[in-house]
Image (spheres, helix red, strand yellow):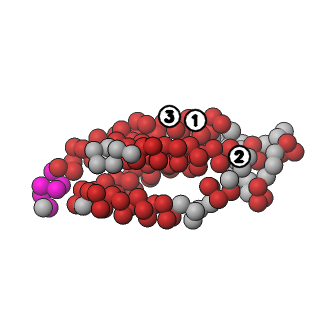
């Protein structure tokens, strides 16, 4: 499960998604991709910049009561606080956003992205750096974030295409 949380593991997958969006959406893909940057910024800052500093809940790998009961993989312990998982917030936000905006041409995409997001998130629990609630909460919180950014895409994309086409 280490590979599922590794920073560079998913680069080919992200590259494939980008190429797929460009191929299927042409001009629309530019705005769609720019909004992915906004989406990830929002979800990541919500997790790392707001939730973790407010709740200051120790990760299982930093909890003195649990440290002897955990199997730490590759001596990876993550940062001090873990509620909520940035990995889970980011991957679920991306999965839900693309499900919403790409459903017209890529109907099969949710069947790939949502299990992928769950897999990446569960790997964080397996590694001992998150509790289950640390991945469930951002999965739920990512829905309104994805809805908001998808709404921006649906509202402004026709205007942008019309203006620059």
Question: Residue at 48% across / 43% down in the picture?
Answer: 114
* Residue occupied by mark 1: 136
| 3D distance between C-alphas at marks 3 and 1 | 6 Å
* Residue occupied by mark 2: 126
From the top left corner, tell me how far across and down residue 87 is, in percent.
56, 50
For disc 3, the neighbor class at 10 Å (few under 14, some 14 to 19, many from 20) is some
From the top left corner, tell me how far across and down residue 150 is, in percent.
32, 43
Q: Is residue 89 visible?
A: no
Horizontal side, residue 116 vs residue 163: left or right: right
| 3D distance between C-alphas at marks 2 and 3 | 20 Å
From the top left corner, tell me how far across and down residue 112 is, in percent.
47, 47
Question: Residue at 68% across / 44% down in the picture?
Answer: 125
- In the image, the segment drawn in magenta is 159-164
| 3D distance between C-alphas at marks 1 and 2 | 14 Å
Question: Residue at 65% across / 36% down in the picture?
Answer: 132
For disc 2, the neighbor class at 10 Å (few under 14, some 14 to 19, many from 20) is some
Q: Are marks 2 and 3 in contact (CB under 8 Å)?
A: no
Q: Is residue 102 magenta?
A: no
Q: Which mark is residue 140?
A: 3
Q: Is the C terminus in the top left, top right, bottom left or bottom right quadrant?
A: bottom left
**In this rendering, the label closer to the viewer, 1 or 2:** 2
């Amino acid at each position: 499960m280490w590979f599922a949380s590794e920073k560079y593991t998913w680069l080919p997958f992200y590259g494939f998604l980008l190429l797929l969006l460009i191929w299927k959406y042409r001009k629309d893909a530019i705005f769609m991709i720019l909004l992915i940057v906004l989406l990830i910024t929002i979800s990541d800052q919500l997790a790392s910049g707001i939730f973790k500093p407010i709740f200051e809940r120790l990760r299982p790998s930093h909890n003195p009561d649990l440290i002897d009961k955990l199997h730490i993989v590759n001596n990876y312990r993550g940062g001090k606080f873990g509620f909520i998982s940035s990995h889970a917030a980011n991957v679920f936000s991306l999965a839900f956003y693309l499900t919403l905006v790409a459903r017209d041409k890529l109907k099969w995409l949710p069947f790939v992205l949502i299990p992928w997001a769950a897999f990446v998130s569960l790997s964080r629990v397996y590694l001992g750096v998150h509790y289950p609630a640390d991945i469930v909460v951002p999965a739920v919180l990512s829905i309104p974030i994805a809805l908001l950014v998808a709404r921006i895409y649906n509202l402004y994309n026709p205007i942008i295409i019309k203006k620059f086409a």
